[in-house]
């Protein structure tokens, strides 16, 4: 199989327009003859469904949540980037493009990233028209803040609840299409398999989470917008039901999984506090606009933070990276937090935390100004930790947060299975080996509002699919497969809870496939994951029946897929003999401990083909070429 | 953080399916860390149930950060429990005393049928949103964002309504199981902004009518909703919505 990105050629700034002009169109009255399935109602799914509905396609939308508005996008805090240059500080489409390619450590496709930067400005326009209550200046214009890895203020925000407000905007547009009858909504409906007919994606198998009933839905194209897989680490900042099932099942049906080892460990999260802990809570990166990161200079200094005098504090990010200071990209900030804790200078009960201190900002701007910017985050911090961040510095530590890897897609956001599109965090496309803050929301909405509506149409116009019924052998096979699998899970009746498997998997992954990876550790973990998979299928206990509301069964089905994905992540990390962005191989670092790339051998996308669990997957490479941004060693000094 | 452990007795509503009768069952929650969240305490109880081969207590949750609106348990008669302005998932065990008995029930309202144990069906809220809870604007025809000036106070006011997470605590707390605060927050958010003006009255009328169709009760101003709302949304939005609704009734061609 050879991989074609189908990227247009020519001057980078003209590519998307040229491509749009070449995509075939379907006339407005004919669009209603085509049916599109969208799985997921986060920013990517809701925006895609609404826009395709507006254009006149018949759209069926599925989510495992009880309402589209609950998708995990709702939890995004800090903001969304756009190259509006409203601050007149030198921003431009080119700069956003450049920052994103560099931030991703030169492992993303230039054409895609440029398109993202181009459409970013329209996203803000659309959101404002929908009624998203972005922060404003006194004169009534939109306000901006800065995020890591950049030197301009291009991030739009709605207090610390930007994702919520953007999602409600996309959701309202989706519900408008439900109102007109163009979109049909299926909530509490989990996609558990993909139906492929004659090599093309034609439908999905869905489990009704209330009754347990399985059904098949067929369409002309299927779009997966099912989010990321950080929950493979068990403890992450993702919501509890975030999962890989949709993407993993598509992978098992032939879709290539790209760069699974590119995961983002976010530097500012509330540290773990106990065994019983179920998830970790993010403290938005935007806090680094005003908070200063430090640890004591002396290892083992146990004094309360406010008792440590100024000259005995090490503001290590400001010291090591004077240009970017506390606003270095996430991978750099996380790695440095790990280093200082490894040196014994970490703080808090476990010694695995660093301070994020607002003392100076409060002195400079006053407590009210800080409250207006971050009030909800400070409240959340206080509810969880019982500490008052207006008085004592926050304690933070890195946690799994975002996954840059995902299903491989071409420039049209179509996977290698014709008719299967993948958007939002579920695809691999725009962030390379490290995502910059406030860029995921941008990408999800860019994909849904401005890319898919063109490219899905372009595919459909040339590919009128034959009608199929539920009697089709491929449909019957998929249904039988799912039936058997769920029956097996419920039938094992072993001794261990699903939760205990998930927790063990997460610990293995965090330890060996987390912030720092080595050949030895990866080889070891692959063997252990394999053993865990075998034990899972012999010894898991799932109470209740398959034909009912059964949350343990839902979890078991997801954890089974996480275990398989975990192995692929480790294999991908093992194959990539370099460090880049969030992927840090101990064997490959500069003398200062920064990521050391190997452009000669690894300037490619690693897209993996499944050969079934326990078997070595097949690697396909998409070479990356950099025509417009020069490959350099990243520097934030 | 000073971490202790406490023991609690739970009386939990168990109901296998919508059409079965429910009942309270007693469980012991032992050695619960006061730093744990309420849902982590329930996780602990559930893991013990599973280890004993029993079906765990069904409850809904997702973000566990107070933003998705999925969680919601009536604890000792209070929607989302005793802490003001806090969702069930953000409630921490340090709010409770050692040896306490807690009663856990689902949201109870005609508009929210119980699905299982503590989980209810809130799809009615989506149907209310589909009845006009939007600005009619297609992708592609939005003007430049800064061409619509919105003062800081207006944007902030709109945000205060827009922050509603649709959890349904207002309905659960209301003696009439009315959904007025939810609907008013959604109507108020858009009606406060210039972008939402063209459809403001029509929107209010359609959404309120849909609320009635869904079987939610009428508002008799008990203000219980405001007290239970984890996002502290003010009942002033209900007055604003009532004015829009009246206006819509006067301008009949707008409906
Ligand atoms: C705490 C937090 C804060 C963040 N803050 C920011 C920020 O400030 N700025 C920024 O740019 N990014 C931020 N991010 C990242 C960003 O929020 C996400 O990457 C983005 O929202 C993902 O959107 P999505 O539409 O791809 O997926 P999601 O929003 O995760 O939606 C996935 C959808 O798929 C559905 N689904 C999944 N699997 C199935 C299945 N098998 N069957 C049916 N339905 C399924 C779900 O129900 C859901 O509707 C943050 C992330 C976290 C965790
Ligand atoms: S679980 Fe999301 S608000 Fe409680």
Image (cartoon, coloured by chain):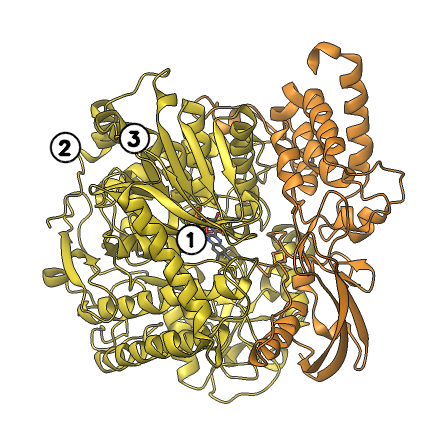
User: Do the CB atoms of the residues marked 2 and 1 lie less than 8 Å apart?
Assistant: no
Pointer 3: what residue? A467
- State the CA–CA distance, disc 1 to disc 3: 44 Å
Tag 3: Cα neighbours inside 10 Å, few (<14), some, or many (≥20)?
few
- Of the four image quadrants, the one with ligand 2 is bottom right
| Residue B123 % position (x, y) | 63, 42
The disc numbered 2 marks a residue on which chain? A
Residue at the extreme bottom: A300
Q: Would residue B203 be seen by someone viewing this image from the given angle?
A: yes
| Colour for chain B in the figure | orange
Tag 2: Cα neighbours inside 10 Å, few (<14), some, or many (≥20)?
few
Q: Are marks 2 and 1 on the same chain?
A: yes
Pointer 1: what residue? A437
Number of numbered discs visible in the structure rendering: 3
Distance from mark 1 CB to nearest ligand 1 atom below 8 Å = yes
Pointer 2: what residue? A10
The disc numbered 1 marks a residue on which chain? A
- Which quarter shows the C terminus of chain A? bottom left
| Residue A47 % position (x, y) | 45, 36
Q: Is residue B116 above or below residue A317?
A: above
Q: Quadrant of residue A586?
A: bottom left
Label 1 or label 3, whichever comes before in sequence order = 1
| Residue B82 % position (x, y) | 80, 63
Q: Would residue A318 be seen by someone viewing this image from the given angle?
A: no
């Amino acid at each position: 199989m050879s991989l074609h990105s189908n990227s247009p050629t020519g001057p980078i700034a003209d590519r998307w327009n040229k491509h749009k002009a070449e995509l075939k169109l379907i006339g407005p009255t004919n669009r209603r003859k085509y049916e599109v399935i969208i799985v997921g109602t986060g920013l990517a799914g809701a925006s895609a469904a609404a826009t395709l509905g507006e254009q006149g396609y018949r759209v069926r939308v599925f989510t495992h949540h009880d309402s589209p508005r609950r998708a995990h996008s709702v939890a995004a805090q800090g903001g969304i980037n756009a190259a509006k240059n409203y601050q007149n500080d030198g921003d431009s489409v080119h700069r956003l493009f450049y920052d994103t390619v560099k931030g991703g450590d030169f492992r993303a496709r230039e054409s895609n990233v440029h398109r993202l930067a181009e459409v970013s400005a329209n996203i803000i326009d659309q959101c404002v028209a929908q009624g998203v209550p972005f922060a404003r200046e006194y004169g009534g214009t939109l306000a901006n803040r800065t995020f890591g890895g950049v030197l301009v203020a291009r991030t739009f925000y709605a207090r610390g609840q930007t994702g919520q407000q953007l999602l409600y905007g996309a959701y309202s547009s989706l519900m408008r299409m439900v109102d007109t009858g163009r979109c049909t909504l299926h909530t509490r409906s989990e996609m558990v398999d993909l139906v492929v007919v004659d090599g093309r994606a034609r439908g999905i198998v869905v489990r009704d989470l209330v009754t347990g009933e399985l059904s098949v839905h067929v369409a002309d194209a299927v779009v997966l917008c099912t989010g990321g897989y950080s929950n493979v680490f068990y403890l992450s900042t993702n919501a509890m039901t975030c999962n890989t099932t949709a993407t993993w099942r598509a992978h098992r049906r032939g879709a290539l999984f790209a760069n699974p080892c590119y995961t983002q460990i976010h530097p500012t999260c509330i540290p773990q506090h106990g065994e019983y802990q179920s998830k970790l809570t993010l403290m938005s990166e935007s806090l680094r606009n005003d908070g200063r990161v430090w640890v004591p200079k002396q290892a083992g200094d146990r004094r309360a933070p406010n008792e440590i005098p100024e000259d005995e504090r090490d503001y290590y990010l400001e010291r090591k990276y004077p240009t970017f200071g506390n606003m270095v990209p996430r991978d750099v900030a996380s790695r440095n937090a790990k280093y200082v804790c490894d040196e014994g200078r970490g703080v808090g009960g476990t010694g695995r935390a660093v301070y994020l201190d607002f003392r100076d900002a409060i002195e400079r701007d006053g407590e009210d100004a800080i409250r207006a910017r971050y009030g909800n985050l400070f409240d959340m911090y206080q509810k969880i930790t019982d500490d008052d961040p207006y008085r004592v510095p926050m304690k933070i530590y890195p946690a799994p947060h975002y996954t840059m890897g995902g299903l491989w897609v071409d420039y049209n956001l179509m996977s290698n299975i014709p008719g299967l599109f993948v958007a939002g965090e579920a695809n691999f496309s725009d962030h390379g080996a490290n995502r910059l803050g406030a860029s995921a929301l941008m990408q999800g909405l860019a994909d849904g509002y401005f890319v898919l509506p063109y490219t899905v149409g372009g595919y459909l116009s040339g590919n009128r699919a034959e009608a199929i019924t539920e009697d089709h052998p491929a449909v019957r096979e998929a249904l039988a497969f799912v039936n058997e699998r769920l029956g097996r899970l419920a039938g094992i009746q072993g001794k261990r809870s699903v939760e205990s498997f998930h927790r063990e998997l997460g610990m293995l992954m965090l330890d060996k496939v987390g912030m720092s990876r080595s050949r030895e550790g990866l080889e070891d973990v692959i063997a252990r994951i394999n053993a865990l998979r075998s034990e899972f299928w012999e010894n898991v206990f799932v109470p209740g029946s398959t034909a009912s509301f059964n949350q343990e069964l839902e979890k078991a089905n997801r954890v089974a897929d996480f275990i398989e994905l975990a192995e692929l992540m480790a294999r991908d990390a093992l194959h990539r003999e370099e460090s880049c962005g969030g992927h840090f191989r101990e064997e490959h670092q500069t003398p200062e401990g920064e990521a050391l790339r190997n452009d000669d051998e690894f300037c490619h996308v690693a897209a993996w083909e499944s050969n079934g669990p326990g078997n070595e997957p097949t690697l396909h490479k998409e070479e990356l070429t950099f025509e417009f941004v020069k490959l350099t060693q990243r520097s934030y000094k | 953080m000073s971490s202790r452990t406490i023991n609690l007795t739970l009386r939990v509503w168990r109901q296998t399916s919508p059409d079965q009768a429910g009942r309270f069952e007693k469980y012991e929650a032992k050695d619960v860390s006061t730093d744990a969240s309420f849902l982590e305490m329930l996780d602990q109880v559930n893991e013990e149930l599973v280890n004993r081969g029993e079906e765990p207590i069904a409850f809904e949750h997702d973000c566990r950060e107070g933003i998705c609106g999925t969680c919601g348990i009536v604890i000792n008669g209070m929607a989302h429990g005793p802490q003001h302005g806090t969702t069930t998932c953000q409630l921490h065990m340090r709010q409770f005393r050692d040896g306490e008995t807690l009663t856990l029930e689902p949201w109870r309202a005609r508009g929210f049928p119980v699905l299982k144990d503590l989980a209810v069906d809130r799809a009615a809220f989506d149907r209310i949103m589909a009845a006009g809870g939007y600005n009619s604007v297609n992708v592609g025809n939005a003007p430049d964002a800064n061409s619509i000036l919105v003062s800081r106070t207006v944007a902030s006011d709109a945000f205060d309504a827009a922050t509603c997470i649709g959890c349904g605590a207002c309905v659960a707390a209301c003696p009439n199981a009315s959904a007025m605060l939810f609907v008013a927050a959604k109507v108020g958010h858009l009606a406060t902004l210039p972008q939402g003006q063209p459809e403001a009255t029509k929107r209010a009328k359609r959404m309120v009518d849909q609320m009635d169709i869904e079987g939610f009760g009428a508002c008799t101003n008990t203000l219980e909703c405001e007290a239970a709302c984890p996002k502290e949304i003010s009942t002033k939005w209900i007055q604003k919505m009532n004015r829009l609704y009246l206006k819509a009734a006067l301008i009949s061609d707008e409906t």
